Image (cartoon, helix red, strand yellow):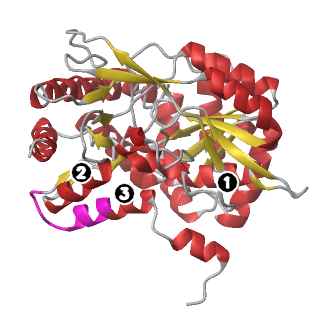
Amino acid sequence: MNLSKFGKKFTQPTGITQLMEDLGNANNSGNPDIVMLGGGNPALIPESNDLFVKELQALISSSKVDSMLGLYDGPLGFDEFREALADMLNDHYGWGLDANNIALSNGSQSNFFSLFNLLAGEMTDGSNNKILFPLAPEYVGYADQGLSDDMFVSIKPKINILENDSASDASHSKQKQFKYEIDFDVLEETLAETHRNIGAICVSRPTNPTGNVITNDELSRLDALAQQYQIPLIIDNAYGHPFPGAIYIDAKLTWNPNTILCMSLSKLGLPGLRTGIVIANHDIINALSRINGVMILAPNSVGPTLMTRMIKDKELLNLCRNVIKPFYEDKAATAVRVFDEVFADQPVYLHKLEGAFFMWLWFKDMDITGQELYTRLKREDVYIIPGHNFFIGIEDDWEHKHQCIRINYAKDEATLRKGLEAIHRIITS
């Protein structure tokens, strides 16, 4: 098959396709002994799921299901949902949004493909703009989104080794832990030299893969730099406030016309509905509307229709506050406890758990690489993600990027323990 340049780029093996192929193969294998700690699938929370099923049944019993399944929405998505979401965010944060500040898509992955290629890559004047990640590691799904080659630049983090703490909350471990911080000296120097070729700054908060939540001060400084250089600031808020609200420290959510805030319904426990959300100024939203019209005609209606009444009646916020956040916070505390027990005798570092549902392990003083560990675990039907995939745009010879792995702890305790014990067995053999 004679492939185009586009075809060759998007059919080569990538970190995100490896992740999704592993997830699909494990889910379809029928093997009850598989330990899947590698995917980004949220947990199925019974109380939440019951509410979603009840809402779907109510839609089926009403005439709304006919329009949900039988009619196209406009290219920005279901109007009633966008209006309800704008009202909710205005009530909650005082942002002054209207429905035309919001665009929907078939999942966040689709949004980032559109946004990255809208703002960066080969420009009309012949120059090439890049997407700047101010804090690596970052979400593996960003890495191969660019239509142009070499479209991403990342700043290495500061690695802050934290004091041991016997506290029992989700963010503390009795074992060695650390936290990544933005190196603003390098970031400011990079922007001063290259800002004319930076199309956007992008950061996830909480961060997939590490569970890091950049501080309010770090976010404020990023916003100030973005506005200083008139560069859009993209915030991937898929795990953040107000839904699903999987943040375990103080973290304020902000928006202004220079911010592009990306949200999702997936982490509520609805990944199959593929609903991504962009909140931005009208120019960005108009551009996304035209891209949607070309690429997908219109976003699917099921997720937005399912959530509209729950948003209007404030039921969704109550669900996040009283069910979803406590569920994941309890999972985080369990993950820390099990980690402490399994690795009590080993120099393994855990990134401080501040949000989302991922553990990021750093094998600082060991010879084994994340890729080697991934390969050996896979032979035992234990799936994790090697960390080097998440260091987008960072030179390959940086040792740290090969010393880390990501684990999804949105599992039952027995599954998590089995996976961590398999890791312990391999690194001590």
Which of the two residues, 298 or 201, is positioned nearer the viewer here? Answer: 201
Q: Secondary structure at mark 1?
A: helix
Q: Nearer the viewer, mark 2 or mark 1?
A: 2
Disc ID at residue 287: none
Residue 228, magenta (yes or no):
no
Q: Secondary structure at mark 2?
A: helix
Disc 2 and disc 3 in contact, CB within 8 angstroms:
no
Q: Which residue is mark 2?
A: 373
The amino acid pointed to by label 1 is: Ser
Which of the two residues, 327 or 37, is positioned nearer the viewer here? Answer: 37
Disc 2 and disc 1 in contact, CB within 8 angstroms:
no
Q: Which residue is mark 1?
A: 114
Look at the image and tell me whether residue 63 can be seen: no
**Residue 157 percent coordinates (x, y):** 51, 29
**Residue 160 percent coordinates (x, y):** 42, 19
Horizontal placement of 139 versus 342: left or right? right
Q: Nearer the viewer, mark 2 or mark 3?
A: 2
Look at the image and tell me whether residue 356 can be seen: yes
Q: Where does the N terminus fall, quadrant-wise?
A: bottom right
Instruction: Count residues near mark 3 (Cα–Cα under 10 Å), then give few for <14, some for 14-19, many for 20+.
Output: some
Q: Earlier in the sequence, mark 3 or mark 1?
A: 3
Q: Earlier in the sequence, mark 2 or mark 1?
A: 1
Q: CA distance from mark 3 to mark 1?
A: 22 Å
Which of the two residues, 427 or 12, is positioned nearer the viewer here? Answer: 427
Q: Which residue is mark 3?
A: 19
Q: Residue at x 56, y 58 (%)?
A: 144
Q: Secondary structure at mark 3?
A: helix
The amino acid pointed to by label 3 is: Leu
Give the residues in magenta: 22-33
The amino acid pointed to by label 2 is: Leu
Tell me which corner region of the image, top left, top right, bottom left or bottom right, holds residue 99. top right
Q: Nearer the viewer, mark 3 or mark 1?
A: 3
